[in-house]
Image (cartoon, grey):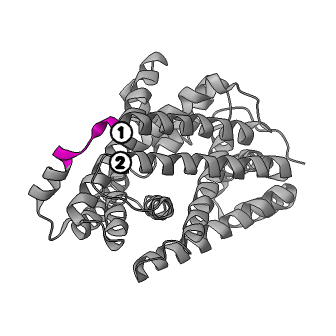
Amino acid sequence: MRSKTLRLLIGVLISAVFLWLALRGLHLADVWGSLRSADYIWLIPSIAVYFVAVWARTWRWDYLLRPIKRISLGRLFPVVVIGYMGNNVYPFRAGEVLRAVVLRQRESVAVSSSLATIVVERVFDGLVMLLFVFVALPFAPLPSDSIRFVVILGSVLFFGALLVFLAVAAVPARFLRLAEWLVSHLVPQRLRAPLLGFAERFVEGLLCLRDPRNLAMIFLTSVVIWLLETVKYWFVMHAFDFTVSFFALMLMNGIVNLATTLPSAPGYIGTFDGPGIAVLTLYGVDPAVATAYTLTLHAALWLPITLLGIYYMIRTQLHWADIGRAVEQGRALDDAPEGRVVP
């Protein structure tokens, strides 16, 4: 309980800092005026495009899961939506664990294996965000040193993670032997078997990276997903009285989603809004208009997927208490039979 409370407090503190940096000096009456004058009819196509992107996310997850189990897109889509709903209402991206647990309950896929595929998703998302930043640079140069630091740090982390995962997928047996040696020398006896079982199933989830065609499809699908999300940014922009280039919106999309990898309060409060407002302001958008736009965009990203996730949760006969336990005990619920032996 103490650990959970500490994590929540850290996330709330980080969110508060980002919000304070973004909102200091603003006249809230001006923000309210921009919100009142917005043409919200543009939210309709923006939400439609966003759900096309969610379907593309489901298609990508299908490619990642194929070496483990083939599951129809119709059965995967509700699981993806429930997971994103969990990310929106729980801190620290706990919806990722929830998604793995729901998949375990519905399709008997080991939690640790599906978690590996979800981690790979996040790595490819990060790489595409960086790609967006670099593609946009000739047309919308990075406007501040702090944003440059985020890009450099993200480059090191995501490229490093991808190289590690590719190496593990290429020689899984060697990685497992190394893991067994480390566990036998560093971990108490009672924890060795569970950790080694987790490692084996996690490696199983990385086997999708051994097929170059899968790699290409995962990358291309990731690009499509984030281009569609940038189109959503573009639609919402038309509801407000400002215009920036599509490349500037690509840059904003990349920066805010890199920032949301930081711990925060539920729903990425602050870590989404602060960088988004800052990027637009640095490109000449009035701070009040930038704030109104970013808050509206955040709500349009948060509310529809959360409501649909609650709907699927009810249809799946999940209860909030069950979700809370899944988030807290996701790894412990991985009681599937031992994973296949990795070649």
Name the residue that disc number 2 marks. Answer: 238
* Direction from residue 196 to residue 3 in the image, left or right: left
Seen from the viewer's position, the closer of residues 22 and 233 is: 233
Taking the view exactly as shown, the residue that stands out farthest to the bottom is 145
Amino acid type at mark 2:
His
Would residue 252 be seen by someone viewing this image from the given angle?
Answer: yes
Q: Residue at x 62, y 30 (%)?
A: 104
Q: Residue at x 47, y 79 (%)?
A: 149
Q: Residue at x 52, y 72 (%)?
A: 139
In x, y percent, where is residue 270?
A: 31, 59
Q: Residue at x 41, y 22 (%)?
A: 311
Q: Quadrant of residue 71?
A: top right
* Direction from residue 32 to residue 39 in the image, left or right: right
Q: Is residue 40 magenta?
A: yes
* Direction from residue 92 to residue 178 in the image, left or right: right
Marks 1/2 in contact by CB < 8 Å: the verdict is: yes
Q: CA distance from mark 1 to mark 2?
A: 7 Å
Q: Main secondary structure of the magenta part?
A: helix
Numbered range of the magenta stretch = 35-41
Seen from the viewer's position, the closer of residues 228 and 262 is: 228
Q: Is residue 159 above or below residue 95?
A: below
In x, y percent, where is residue 313?
A: 44, 24
Seen from the viewer's position, the closer of residues 295 and 95 is: 295
For residue 42, the mark is 1
Number of labels in the image equals 2
Q: Is residue 213 magenta?
A: no
Element type where label 2 sits in the image: loop
In x, y percent, where is residue 257?
A: 47, 58
